[in-house]
Amino acid sequence: MSIDTTIMVAFHDALRRDLEQVARRAGNAEGQLDAAVGWELFGRYLDVHHRAEHDLLWPMLLQVLEGRDDDLALVASLEEEHTPIDPLIDQANAVLRGESDERLADVIDALVTNLNEHLRHEEQDGLPMMGRVLSEDQWTQFG
């Protein structure tokens, strides 16, 4: 029996939707304040999601997948995909605090690209693998 990962896909869809809204607002000179407000909420949700993966999901998978090199490599690649995302979040925060001369729209566009690639990879390859190897109890513990 495979676990139901629908909630993860729904959460990913919400992240995509909210980031696209921030990107549209950031690209409009009159929308900067709206972008900042939308960014606050989006940033919190993304932070919670990434922390849950780092603190709970990845360690759980590493334990369950011991000796399964291909699956372990997949987990490592998913985890590594967070690496370029975190600095982009920091850059966006710096722009909004007035500590950077970068354009918010440029930073958000880079984040859209990186995050969408990661979410697609997680949904296409990661979630099916998780569905095969995690028990309902383990998935509930992560959730």
Image (cartoon, rainbow, N blue to C red):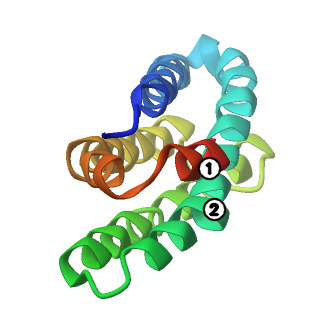
Q: Residue reaching furthest top?
A: 30
In the image, residue 16 sits, relative to residue 106, either above or below, namely above
The residue lying at 43 percent from left, 27 percent from top is 16
Name the residue that disc number 1 marks: 142
**Mark 2 touching mark 1, by CB under 8 A?**
yes
Q: Could you say where residue 9 lies in the image, as x and y percent from the top left?
A: 40, 29
Amino acid at the residue labelled 2: Leu
The residue lying at 35 percent from left, 53 percent from top is 130
Q: Residue reaching furthest right?
A: 97
Name the residue that disc number 2 marks: 56
Query: Which residue is more in the foreground, 45 or 27?
Result: 45
Q: Could you say where residue 52 lies in the image, as x and y percent from the top left?
A: 65, 54
Res. 76 image quadrant = bottom left
Which dot marks residue 22?
none
The residue lying at 50 percent from left, 43 percent from top is 136
93 relative position to 117: left or right? right
In the image, residue 132 sits, relative to residue 60, either above or below, namely above
Q: What is the secondary structure assignment of the residue under circle 1? A: helix
Distance between the alpha carbons at the discs numbered 2 and 1: 6 Å
Query: Which residue is more in the foreground, 32 or 143?
Result: 143
The residue lying at 45 percent from left, 22 percent from top is 10
